Image: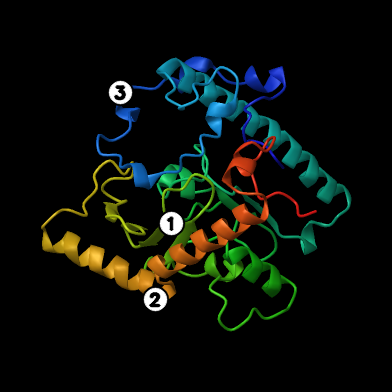
Amino acid sequence: FFKPHLPFNAPKKYWDMHESAAFALGEECMAPSEVFPWTYSKQMELGGYQGVPGNEAVSFDQAQHLRHGYYACVSYVDAQIGRVLDALDRLEAGENTIVLLLGDHGFWTKMAMYEGSVAVPMIIAGKGIPQGQYRKDPAHLLDIPATALAWAGLTPPPDWPGHNLITTVNQPPDHDRTLFSEYHDGGANTGFFMVVWSSWKVIAYAGYAPQLFNLEDDPEENHDLAQSSLPIHQDALKEGRRRLLEICDPDAINQLAFADQRQKIAEFGGVEACLNAPAFNATPTPI
């Protein structure tokens, strides 16, 4: 399902399910004072919609309206998912079907490594899965292929980093598991890399200073601890760097990504041709 992706439009009945006042924002929802330009993308997708400033500096009222629209879209797509589940019941197919509900990024798009972007819902149901549980197990989108292969009786490649979610939800949580994400898409100043384990998150920016957050103490990520001199924070920063290097060399990967982007830009006629292309929001289809 495309929704609840932008634009936040949905049939009126789903808007009317929610009270606009419920989405009012307070000063506590303002961005942290230290937001560096390399920590987010400059793509400005939201700013391309009517009524939204091009620089995406929305007012509190606009943010409230956008949140209302987002929840209306969630209610709309929830109803569509209900139609799919009803069809499974009618076909008596539930016993041999795994249902997995998730999103590809958070509310404010996928162009940052903060929880509001990288933390997505993941709901799984089916045979062999305990019902009615809310768990905080570390989980990754790479777990989906591993789960699908296991459900089909197949074995993932030996070096596949994903876990079988059916096994995961039937075992104690492994909070020491490393979760990883990276971003090189449109508008990025540089490559973004994230590792999360236990209560810690380290975000590495190729060529720039990293960030460190304690998600248990600071779930809103308002307090970057990377510059702290406390040993516990410096140790966490080093551990995050170690875990990241076990997965990839961020500087080398960043160079490869930008080299690939330069090659694609050249293939499609250069920078000006890409900037002037109609509705350019992805790599054009080769002709």
Please tell me the numbered disc located at residue 246. Answer: 2
**Mark with earlier residue (1, 2):** 1
Q: Nearer the viewer, residue 110 or 122?
A: 110
Residue at the (30%, 39%) spot, across then down: 35
Tell me the residue that label 3 is attached to: 27
Structural distance between the alpha carbons of marks 2 and 3: 40 Å
Q: Nearer the viewer, residue 253 or 14?
A: 253
Please tell me the numbered disc located at residue 191. Answer: 1
**Crowd band around label 2 with a 10 angstrom C-alpha radius: few (<14), some (14–19), many (20+):** few
Please tell me the numbered disc located at residue 21. Answer: none
Residue at the (60%, 52%) spot, across then down: 265
From the image, which quarter does the N terminus lie in?
top right
Report the mark closest to the observer, 2 or 3.
2
Residue 273, located in which quarter of the rendered image?
top right
Q: Provide residue 223's location: percent of width, then percent of height.
A: 24, 44
Give the residue type that dot 2 points to: Glu
- In this view, the residue farthest toward the right is 91
- In the image, is 277 to the left or to the right of 65? right
For mark 1, give the secondary structure.
Answer: loop
**Mark with earlier residue (3, 1):** 3
Q: Provide residue 192's location: percent of width, then percent of height.
A: 42, 55
For mark 2, give the secondary structure.
Answer: helix
- In the image, is 228 to the left or to the right of 275? left
Give the residue type that dot 1 points to: Gly
- In the image, is 145 to the left or to the right of 225? right
In contact (CB < 8 Å): disc 1 and disc 2: no
Residue 78, located in which quarter of the rendered image?
top right
